[in-house]
Every structure is written in C-alpha cells, then in structure tokens.
Amino acid sequence: MVHPALEPFVRAVQEIPPPHPSTQDIAERRVAYRELAQGLRGELDEMDDIVDVGVALDGRTLRTRLYVPPGDEKTALVLYFHGGSFVVGDLETHDWLCRRLATDTKMRLLAVEYRLAPEHVFPAGIDDAIAMLRYVSSHLSDFAPDGAELLVMGDSAGATLAAVASALTRSEGLDLAAQVLIYPTMGPELVTDSANRYGVGYMLDLEHLRYDYTQYLGVTIDHTDPRVTPLMFEDLSGAPPAIVVVAECDPLRDEGLAYAGLLEHFGVRVEILEAEGMIHGFLRLGGLVPEAMQIVDDLAEHMHHFVEHASA
C-alpha cells in the first residue's frame, strides 16, 4: 500500500500520465527532468565545501562534484552514480539528494556525471563507472583523508552501474567497503510480479523504461550479457558487501531483491532495506515529503557498520 504522504503524487500521475519519451526530443526531456528536480527539492543542506572536479580518463573528461558535509567523520568517501534511465540526469538534478546523503551519513560524497544515451550507447556508461571506480580507488587521497574507506553507491540506473562496476572489478583489489544499490534496475526484461503490479501509475512507467533501454542499448544487444542484466552473472564470489534498498510499491522491487539473493548465493554479505509504502525514486521526493527520507537514517547506520568492519 502506498504511503499516505505519497498518494497525491501517485494520483496525479495516474490522472495525467507523463508523455511517452518517444514523443520528446532528448534535449527537451533533460530540461524537463532538471526542472522537475528543481520543483521537488527542498531546502539545500549547507556543505563545508563543494568542489567541481574534472577527471581525465582515456579519451574523455568526466565532471564530478565533491561534497564535504558538516561533521565529516573523515572515515569514508562515497562514489555516487545518479539515476535517470541511462538517458537523463546530471550533477544538478541530484544535487539536493547528494547534499542530503552526505549530511546524513557524515561521509564525503563524489557524484559523477557519466556519459548518457542515446549519444553514448552501451557500454559507455558502464565503462565510465568502471574507470571512475578504478581512478578514485587509486587516487583516494585526492578526495578524502588518509585511511578513508571507499563505498560505491547509485540509485536506479546509477545503481546498475555501481553493481556492474563492483562485480567486474571484484578481483582487482580495490578494497571497497560496500556497494550501496538503491532501487536498481536489473535489465530490460521487466517480468517480475512487482513489475506487473506497479508498472503503470506509480511514478516509473515500465513502457517508458523499456523505451529508454532501447536508447541505451542501441543496436541489438544480448540481454543475457551481465553488464546489461546483472542477474545473469554466473559468479559474484568476492564482490564487495552490499546494501540493497528497495521500495515496496516499485516495479523494480523484485529484481532488486533477486540481485540481493544472487549476491548472497555467492557468499557476499548483503543487508536489505525495504522502504514500506514507498515508490520508485522516493528519495528524490524527500524535499516535499519528509517521510520519504526516513530510511536514510537507517541506510547511514548500515553504511557506517560496513565502514567500521572494513577498517577493523
């Protein structure tokens, strides 16, 4: 059952569904997404410091933004990948959320503006996530005090990038304290019970997500490729411990739980946090609906446990 505080948002979407993404120019969609983020955000948390940094990788430079919160415990850096169905989103659309996450966890957070489709099709976003994870791991002292632990986090499409990057680098000694996956999408098939139950009228329309997958994947791609569908990984032994956040009324809930189960099958420590009554993208609604942020306190506590365990 949808949380009462979110019922007006769900009702509005059901009464006036958003236009199908195929009817909009991608530039227009990005502007609209940015304007929506502006309308949803609450008061911006003050930071001790915010630094925009260009990170030069092979053949490209990615924009990043480092958030240093008041009360920074100086024990960890969170490498963060934003959501947006692989086609929209940037540093500005998730600025409010990044500030809030940094404040609540008391950890530094480095947000990444990775390449988006359709200009940069698969595996560009995956390649950016892997390259950034390797770069930050080897240059950690550039972003955080000596001895800090590294966590990788993402929401929605960004959580998929975080999961795949964590899996594909698990044998490289990057020493990740945790991977934090917030309502991840685990592939384009979308055939679970939660997808059928909440796939229309609950903020994330699965027909829209399927369309965005076609933009992201470009030419025909084998959906059994684990970089596309992480549930197809044949071995995840040695992957970093995970926190998986799912929302009760999210069409992606069941696949997030399935990935948590797959990690556990290969001996990875996993902690699952389910946000009761919440919908996909609920954290981005936190500026207007305080109840949507209640799980963040729990998430911060779990992240601290992983950091303390990694430092022990």
Image (spheres, rainbow, N blue to C red):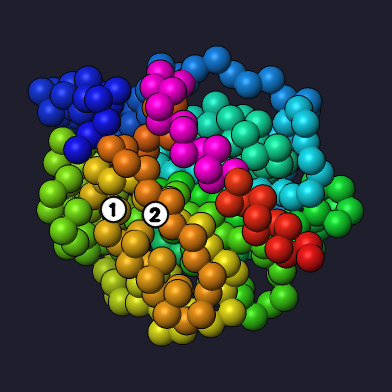
Where residue 185 appears, as percent x and y from the top left, is 35, 56
Q: What stretch is highlighted in magenta?
A: 287-300
Where residue 260 appears, as percent x and y from the top left, is 41, 66
Tell me which residue sits at (17%, 62%) in the image.
191
What's under tag 1, amino acid-wise? Leu
Against 44, residue 143 (above or below) is below
Q: Main secondary structure of the magenta part?
A: helix
Q: Which tag, 1 or 2, sits closer to the chain's start? A: 2
Which of the 4 image quadrants contains residue 19? top left
Q: Is mark 1 on a helix, strand or loop?
A: loop
What's under tag 2, amino acid-wise? Pro
Where residue 237 appears, as percent x and y from the top left, is 53, 82
**Where does label 2 land, which residue?**
184
Whether label 1 touches label 2, CB < 8 Å: yes
Crowding around mark 1 (Cα neighbors within 10 Å: few <14, some 14 to 19, many 20+) is many
Q: In which quarter of the image is the C terminus?
A: bottom right
| Side of 223 relative to 161 (left or right) | left
| Side of 234 relative to 57 (left or right) | left
Tell me which residue sits at (46%, 39%) in the image.
295
**Where does label 1 land, which residue?**
252
Where residue 182 appears, as percent x and y from the top left, is 45, 49
